[in-house]
Amino acid sequence: MTDVADRFVALMEEHRRILYKVAGMYCRDAEERRDLAQEIIVQLWRSFDRYDDRYRFSTWMYRVAMNVAISFHRSESRRTRDAVPFADAMLEIAAPEPESDDIRQLRRFIDELDDLNKALLLLYLDGNDHDTIAEILGITRTNVSTKIGRIKQHLRSKPWSSTT
């Protein structure tokens, strides 16, 4: 491999969790997650020559991954909109891993969010500060704070189980 390819592979290994988090946030189906992860890797490689070393790789990677995920999600939404309703259930071979009611409710809540708020929530839950989130998403820090506040408020207004 070339020095550039070696460097890319090393950075991808170091930051692979970002890849899994983004793919997992936008795709519930394992096969779709793999497809999205591959597409993200391809786009990262194609644009790697434009990565500026003065900035953190993780910030650049998040930005590329989020853009690819949003585009992928939109194209998948168009594709599945015209699908036969029971086709996915018939194709399901492996049983999904059991989830708690809380996790199912949180997934439903996340699925209701638009693409930008879904990306914002992922970055927030991953522990990124408001400045980093703003840089990755291309919005202001104030906008990040406002949107996080609204997401929290919306989450609090959800009718959760009677045990909480």
Image (tube, rainbow, N blue to C red):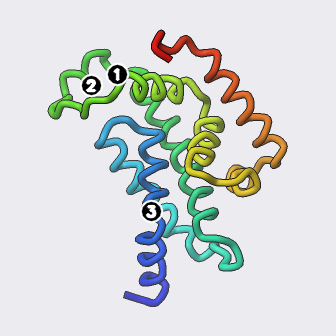
Amino acid type, callout 3? Val
Identify the residue at image location x=43%, y=78%.
Answer: 10
Are the two marked residues, 3 and 1, in contact with CB atoms closer than 8 angstroms?
no
Q: For mark 1, does the 10 Å Cα neighbourhood hold few (<14), some (14 to 19), or many (20 or more) residues?
A: few
Mark 3 = which residue?
42
Q: For mark 2, does the 10 Å Cα neighbourhood hold few (<14), some (14 to 19), or many (20 or more) residues?
A: few
Disc marking residue 83: 1
- Residue 86 x, y percent position in the rendering: 26, 16
| Residue 29 placement, left or right of 59 | left
Amino acid type, callout 1? Ala
Q: Is residue 28 above or below residue 61?
A: above
Amino acid type, callout 2? Asp
The secondary structure type at the circle numbered 1 is loop
The secondary structure type at the circle numbered 2 is helix
Mark 2 = which residue?
88
Sequence-wise first label, 2 or 3: 3
Q: Is residue 72 above or below residue 18?
A: above
Identify the residue at image location x=67%, y=29%.
Answer: 151
Give the CA distance from mark 3 to mark 1. Answer: 27 Å
Q: Is residue 95 above or below residue 21?
A: above
Give the CA distance from mark 2 to mark 1. Answer: 9 Å
Q: Which corner quadrant holds the N terminus?
A: bottom left
Sequence-wise first label, 2 or 1: 1
- Residue 157 x, y percent position in the rendering: 64, 15
Are the two marked residues, 2 and 1, in contact with CB atoms closer than 8 angstroms?
yes
